[in-house]
Image (cartoon, rainbow, N blue to C red):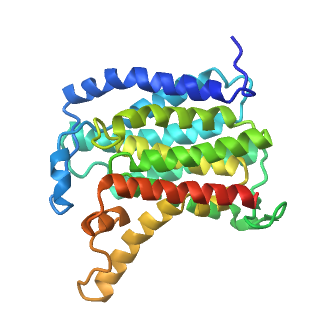
Amino acid sequence: MRFEAAIPAVPVILSFSVSVILSPVIIPFLKKLKAGQTVRDDGPKTHLKKSGTPTMGGIIILLSVVITSVFYMRNYPKIMPVLFVTLGFGIIGFFDDYIKVVLKRSMGLTPLQKLSGQIVVTGIFAYYITQVLHMDLAMKLPFFQGKMIDFGVWNIPVLFLIIIATVNGTNFTDGLDGLASSVTVIIATFFSVVAIGTKSGIEPITCAVAGALLGFLLFNVYPASVFMGDTGSLALGGFVAAAAYMMQMPLFIAIVGLVYAAEVLSVAIQVVYYKISGGKRLFKMAPLHHHFELCGWSETKIVACFSIVTAILCLAALMML
């Protein structure tokens, strides 16, 4: 059977259906594994009731995207590097989650192990798109239609910086029920619109990610029945970065992924300010979504506001094209 990307609803519906079917199977399995979330004691007290909620739900997202992508690989080979990065970062997150929640080792992967894995996945992606696909790493400039910027010898270091920063920004965003899922499904929709409009060849996987997240959100919205864990958040960060690079749009991540940037910057700023001020905090708590929680905002309000901001920024980015 041949699937046509000319009908973008097909990968969305297929991936959504797989996600909805898998969730009631995988969530009880995760409960049997005792793969429950451990809530930090110094976090918002309202999160204590979430302790024990199954995590590692990113497996559902990954399986939905992989199963859907299989039908398109032959006719759309450009989805393969995006799928590789998504899976690669997802596997790193899976090992981190498994060590923490199943083997009950609070540390999980060490920061060095995590970073080493991320560098390896990014390096393979960089090699493939430059040496196999012979892609130009010049980037489209927001606000300047048709204009490109090329960093020359710095293209590869910039690629590593953008991908790893995006992945970790997405990871920090995953802290409230449905937050990372809601923000990323909007970004995936943005990339799908661009991919379809430009016939970039990656539209099946961007649509598949959107569909998988819509299905996952049915179980991940407040009050969540399952969390995606690092398995999901790292995979989604990898997807966003890889999809952007395949369309020469990594600079647009700073616009559509502003929430990711704000989350990771809030952590960095908090740490630096704490050290230079002798123990004072700029935010009530970092990442940024916890600051708003401690200001009295409900989880649903924060998720709604962050999602609305992302949607507006995606519309603005479309206008910039």
Quarter of the image where the C terminus is located: bottom right
Residue 179 x, y percent position in the rendering: 40, 50
Quarter of the image where the N terminus is located: top right
Residue 6 x, y percent position in the rendering: 75, 28
The picture quadrant where one finds residue 285 is: bottom left
Instruction: Please report the residue visible at 32 percent of the width from the left and 49 percent of the height from the top.
Output: 109
Q: Is residue 313 left or right of residue 200?
A: left
Does 286 sit above or below residue 195?
A: below
Residue nearest the viewer, comparing 257 with 114: 257
Residue furthest to the right in view is 146
The picture quadrant where one finds residue 172 is: bottom left
Residue 47 x, y percent position in the rendering: 20, 53
Q: Is residue 183 left or right of residue 299?
A: right
Instruction: Please report the residue visible at 22 percent of the width from the left and 36 percent of the height from the top.
Output: 102
Q: Is residue 88 left or right of residue 195?
A: left
Does 190 sit above or below residue 5?
A: below
Q: Is residue 168 left or right of residue 2?
A: left
The picture quadrant where one finds residue 232 is: top left
Instruction: Please report the residue visible at 17 percent of the width from the left and 63 percent of the height from the top.
Output: 42
Residue 284 x, y percent position in the rendering: 27, 73
**Residue 299 seen by the camera:** yes
**Residue 164 seen by the camera:** no
Does 244 sit above or below residue 1?
A: below
Residue furthest to the top in view is 1
**Tag count:** 0
Residue furthest to the bottom in view is 277
